Amino acid sequence: MRIPKYLHHYFWDVNVKKLDPKKKRYFVISRLLDKGNVRAVRWVRKHYTEEEIKETLKNYRDFSLKSASFWALVYNLPLKKVKCFQEPYRSMREKLWPY
């Protein structure tokens, strides 16, 4: 599995050609669900299981609070199980970016 060219612009900070979507699935899923469009979300849902997506929400803290809330609703996860809503991540985010 490779990341298609139409999704490369979401990975501006890494070398996409070296990015293995299986080994770095949490990173790929979170980046595309957080910053992607409908086409990116369709690609994620086609290539990853619902359980992998839920695990990403539970274990990866780099979601925006808005998109994490949305995906928690979609996948029926309580916010207390979503990593970016847990302490110390939430209070750290508020200190660094109080908006």
Image (cartoon, rainbow, N blue to C red):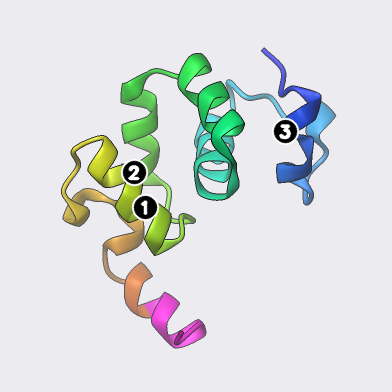
Give amino acid for label 2.
Answer: Trp
Q: Most extreme residue toward the front, as rendered?
A: 38
Q: Is residue 72 left or right of residue 8?
A: left
Which of disc 3 and disc 1 is earlier in sequence? 3
Do we see residue 18 in this rendering?
Answer: no
Q: Residues within 10 Å of mark 2 (few under 14, many from 20)?
A: many
Which percent across, then down, holds residue 8? 78, 35
Residue receiving disc 3 = 7
Residue receiving disc 1 = 68
Find residue 71 and name its label: 2
- Tell whether label 2 touches label 1 (CB within 8 Å): yes
From this view, report whether residue 93 is shown above or below residue 27. Answer: below
User: What stretch of residues is rendered in magenta?
Assistant: 92-99
- The secondary structure type at the circle numbered 3 is helix
Identify which residue is drawn at 21% across, 54% down: 79
Do we see residue 23 in this rendering?
Answer: yes
Q: In this view, does 18 lie to the left or right of 85?
A: right
